[in-house]
Image (spheres, coloured by chain):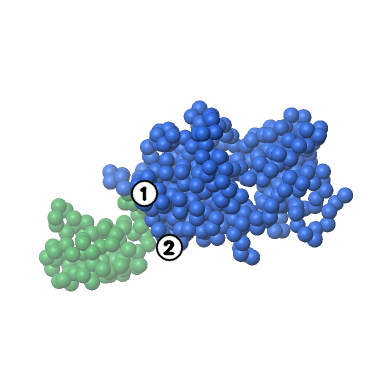
Chain colours: A blue, B green
Amino acid sequence: MSVRDLQLLTGGEAVAEAMRQIDPDVVPVYPITPQTPIIQTFAKFVADGAAHGELVDVESEHSAMSAAIGSALAGARTMTATSSQGLALMAEVVYIAAAMRAPIVMALGNRALSGPINIHCDHSDSMLIRDSGVVQLFAENAQEAYDLTVLGTRLAERREVMLPVLVCQDGFTITHSAEPVALLADTAVRQFVGDYAIPHPLLERGHPATHGPFAMPDYYFELRRQQIAALEAVLDALPEVALEYEQLSGRGYGLLEPYRLDDAERVLVALGSATGTIKDAVDELRDAGEPVGLVKIVSFRPFPAAALAELLRDVPSVIVLDRAASPGGAAPLRAEVASALSGEGTRVEGHVYGLGGRDLHPEDVRDVFARRVGDYVGLRGEPCPV
Amino acid sequence: MSSLTPWQALPHAGAVDASSAVRPETGSWRTGLKPQVELASCVNCLLCWIYCPDSAVKLDGVTFDGFDLDHCKGCEICAEICPVDAITMVPEERAS
C-alpha cells in the first residue's frame, strides 16, 4: 500500500466512513461529546445520499438504544454511537440489548463519567457496563477504530454470538486526532459484512413469538447462562472473523496483541490509545537493553484470560495500567489480569492513570517500568515509592 | 426442577412461541367468581367472545359453546357486556 491510498482522518471520521460503507438500515442516535463527530460525519453522508439508512434523531440515549433494539430485532442492520453520560443513561437498555441478542454495533468515544463533569478520556464509561453482556473491543488508533467497526459488524451477527459489539476509541485522543487511515473499497466492505440476518425477526409473519419475556427464578438463571455462552463464543469467533478480515485488508487482529515479549521480565498490560505510547517507550527501553514488553488487550469483553495466561505465565512481573478506578476495590483490568494469572507465580501489580483525560507520557511509562510510581500515575500529591 | 429445560435447550434469547400461550392452565388464578350462562336467554351475539381478554369463550363453529375455565380469570367483562343478562358470576364453590 502506498501513502496515496491513505486518507487523513480522525478516529471519529474513520468510523463514520466505516458506517457509510457498511450502510446500516437504521441509526438511532443522540449527540454527545466526544462521539458527536462520528454521527455528525455520518449524518452528512445520509444527507448527501452517500448512505441510505434511516437516521433517527431520538430524544435521549435511552431512546437511542431502545430504538436500536427494536430495529435490530425487526430485521434491520442497526448502528449507533455514544459516550460517557450517554452510555450511563443508556445502560439499563444495553443489558436488554444483550439479553435479547440484538447485534447492534455501537461506536463508543470513551469519556470520563461525571462528576466532576469532564469531556475527556478515561474508560469509566466502558467499565460501567462491563457486566452487561456486550462485546467491548478497544482500538489503539483511528485505523483500528475503522477496522474493528467493519470486523465487529460481522462478529456481532455471527449466529453463535448475536450480541451488541462496542467499538471503543479513546475520546479526543482518537476521536478528534487526524492520522493516516487506509480504507477498504466500499464494495469490499459491503461484501465482507454481507446481508443482515437474525434467527426470528419480529416482523416475520409466519412465526409470531414473544420476545424478551419475563423470567421467574425457574428460568432467569438459565437464560443468563445462555447470554454468558454467547459472549464466550466470541473467544473463538473473533479470531476467525479477524483472519478473514486480514485476508481482505492485510491487517491482523486478535483478542490481544503481544508486543516484544521475547524474554521479557516486566510486561505492561493496557487498553486503548495508551498502548501506542507504551510501544514507543518499550522500543526505547529495549534499545537500552531493558527486558520489557506489552500486552495490548483488544477484547476486554469477553476477556481472553486463557490466552493472556499462556503469554505471561513465565514473565516474573506484570504491571497493569487501568484508565478507570474501582473505588474501594481492584481496578477492572487489574482484577481481570490478576484473576487470569492466579496460581502462575507471576507478580501482578497495577496503577491507575489518565482519569479525566490526563495524558500518559513516555516518561510516565518509563517510571512505571522502573517502579518509580505508586498506585496512581501522574497524580499530584501522591507519595512515590523508592 | 428436573422437568425444566436446561439452558442449552432453551430457545434463542428465550423467545416464546405464540402457540405456547394456550398450554399453561391459568384458570387457577381466577378471582373466585366464574361465569355461568342461562342458555335459554342467550341470543348468540358473541359479544362475550369478542370482549373476553383471555379468549376463554368457546365456540362451536359460530355458536356460543360455554367457557374455557382453564383460562378464564373471572374478570366479569362477559357478564357486564351481555346485552340480555344471560351471564351471571357465581362463586367458585357453589358452581361446581
| Chain to which the residue tagged by mark 2 belongs | A
- The residue that appears at 62% across and 54% down in the rendered structure is A121
What amino acid type should be assigned to the residue bearing mark 2? Glu
Q: Secondary structure at mark 1?
A: loop
Residue A367 or residue A130, whichever sits in front: A367
Where is residue A77, by image quadrant?
Answer: top left
Q: Secondary structure at mark 2?
A: loop
Q: Position of residue A281 (x, y in %)?
A: 74, 40
Residue type of the residue flagged with mark 1: Asp
In this rendered view, identify the residue nearer to me: A37 or B25: A37
The span from disc 1 to disc 2 (Cα, nearest Å) is 23 Å
Q: Residue at x 46, y 37 (%)?
A: A154
Pick the front one: A271 or B7 = A271
| Residue annotated with mark 2 | A59
Q: Are marks 1 and 2 on the same chain?
A: yes
Asked if residue A240 shows in the view, the reply is no
Q: Is residue A3 above or below residue A328?
A: above
Is residue A353 depicted above or below B33 in this figure?
A: above
Q: Chain of mark 1?
A: A
Q: Is residue A86 visible in this depiction of the protein?
A: yes
**Does the CB distance between marks 1 and 2 fall below 8 Å?**
no
Q: Position of residue A156 (x, y in %)?
A: 47, 41
Q: Residues within 10 Å of mark 2 (few under 14, many from 20)?
A: few
The answer to whether A282 appears left or right of A168 in the picture is: right
Q: Residue furthest top?
A: A247
